[in-house]
Image (cartoon, rainbow, N blue to C red):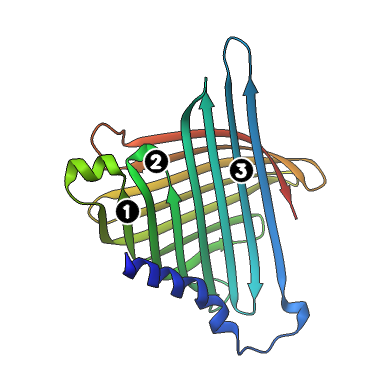
C-alpha cells in the first residue's frame, strides 16, 4: 500500500514539477473541459432513481498535456442501492512532437459491488498518434504498470488476506471520428494484463443540441477475467446524458 501511495504522489507531481522551470508566456496556457450529467427518477408503484456525472478537464502546460477525469454513478431501487461507482484519474502526456509522446497515468476506483473496497492503477509508457487530421484521430499507448486492489471485509474473511497487487502491461486505444460539424463518434479501449486481464471499453456518440450543449449516448463495458466468487466477469452500463463543453 505504501508503494501505491508513493507512486500516486509522484504521478500527481510529475507534470507540474517537470514544467516548473520552463519559460512560457501566459498565452501558451490552455484549459478546457466537459461536464456531463444524466439522471432518472420514478415514483409510485416503483421507486427508482439514478444519477451519472462526469467531469473531464484538459490542460496544456508547455510540452505537457494533462487530463483530469472524475466519474460517479449511483442507482437506487425501492430504497436499495443497486449500483455505486466512483472513479478519479489523472494523466500527463509529454509531447516529443506532434505524433509521439510519453505518458504517466494513475486512477482510483471504488465499486463495492465487485468485492473490492477500491482499485488503483499507475503506469507509464509511450504513446503514438497514427492519425490526427482534426476530423479523425487514432492513437495508442503502451507501457508497464502496477495494480493494487483492496478486498472488502467479507472477501478478506473468506480469503485470509486483505489485498491483491501485481505488475501489469497497460495498453490504450483511442479512436474519434467527426461524423458532421455537430456530431462525433468515439471509441476507447483500456486493458491491464497481469495475473488477470482487466479491461474497459467505451463507445459513444455525441450530438450538439445548441451552442456548447450536447446529448451523449454511451455504452461502457468493464471486463475482469478472474472475478471474485459469484461476481460476473462483465459489467455493462448504458447512459444518455447531457454534456456541456467549456
Residue 54 x %, y %: 61, 47
Residue 227, how many percent across, how many down? 27, 40
Residue 116 in which image quadrant: top left
243 above or below 162?
Answer: above
Image quadrant occupied by the C terminus: bottom right
Looking at the rendered image, the disc whose residue lies closer to the viewer, 3 or 2, is 2
Pointer 1 residue: 149
52 or 222, nearer to the observer: 52
What separation in Å lies between label 3 and label 2 (alpha carbons)? 18 Å
Q: Quadrant of the N terminus?
A: bottom left
Residue drawn where x is 63% and y is 11% of the image: 44
Numbered label tally: 3
Give the farthest residue toward the right. 211
Q: CA distance from mark 3 to mark 1?
A: 24 Å
Q: Residue at x 63, y 52 (%)?
A: 55
Say the numbered circle drawn on residue 53. Answer: 3
Q: Earlier in the sequence, mark 3 or mark 1?
A: 3
Find out whether the residues at labels 3 and 1 contact each other: C-beta distance under 8 Å.
no
Characterize the local packing of mark 3: few (<14), some (14-19) or many (20 or more) Cα atoms within 10 angstroms: some
Is label 1 in a helix, a strand or a loop?
strand
Name the residue: 20% across, 51% down: 161
Query: Residue 77: in sight, yes or no?
Result: yes
Answer yes or no: do the residues labelled 3 and 2 have beta carbons within 8 Å?
A: no
Does dot 2 land on a helix, a strand or a loop? helix
Q: Residue furthest top?
A: 45
Report the residue marked by disc 2: 112
The reply to whether residue 227 is visible in this rendering is: no
Q: Earlier in the sequence, mark 3 or mark 2?
A: 3
- Residue 36 figure quarter: top right
Could you tell me how far apart the alpha carbons at marks 1 and 2 are, in whole angstroms? 12 Å
Residue at the location (21% across, 42% down)?
157
Amino acid at each position: 500500500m505504501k508503494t501505491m501511495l508513493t507512486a500516486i504522489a509522484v504521478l500527481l507531481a510529475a507534470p507540474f514539477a517537470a514544467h516548473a522551470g520552463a519559460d512560457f508566456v501566459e498565452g501558451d496556457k490552455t484549459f478546457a473541459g466537459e461536464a456531463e450529467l444524466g439522471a432518472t427518477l420514478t415514483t409510485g408503484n416503483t421507486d427508482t432513481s439514478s444519477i451519472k456525472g462526469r467531469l473531464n478537464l484538459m490542460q496544456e502546460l508547455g510540452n505537457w498535456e494533462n487530463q483530469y477525469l472524475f466519474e460517479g454513478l449511483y442507482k437506487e431501487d425501492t430504497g436499495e442501492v443497486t449500483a455505486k461507482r466512483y472513479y478519479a484519474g489523472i494523466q500527463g502526456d509529454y509531447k516529443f512532437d506532434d505524433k509521439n509522446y510519453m505518458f504517466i497515468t494513475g486512477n482510483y476506483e471504488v465499486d463495492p459491488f465487485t468485492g473490492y473496497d477500491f482499485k488503483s492503477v499507475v503506469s507509464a509508457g509511450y504513446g503514438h498518434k497514427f492519425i490526427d487530421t482534426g476530423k479523425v484521430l487514432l492513437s495508442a499507448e503502451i507501457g508497464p504498470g502496477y495494480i493494487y486492489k483492496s478486498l472488502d471485509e467479507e472477501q478478506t474473511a473468506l480469503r485470509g488476506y486483505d489485498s491483491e497487487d501485481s505488475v501489469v502491461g497497460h495498453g490504450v486505444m483511442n479512436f474519434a471520428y467527426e461524423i458532421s460539424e455537430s456530431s462525433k463518434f468515439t471509441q476507447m479501449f483500456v486493458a491491464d494484463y497481469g495475473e488477470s486481464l482487466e479491461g474497459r471499453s467505451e463507445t459513444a456518440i455525441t450530438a450538439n443540441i445548441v451552442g456548447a450543449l450536447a446529448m451523449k449516448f454511451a455504452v461502457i463495458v468493464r471486463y475482469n477475467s478472474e472475478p471474485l466468487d459469484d461476481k460476473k466477469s462483465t459489467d455493462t452500463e448504458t447512459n444518455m446524458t447531457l454534456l456541456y463543453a467549456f
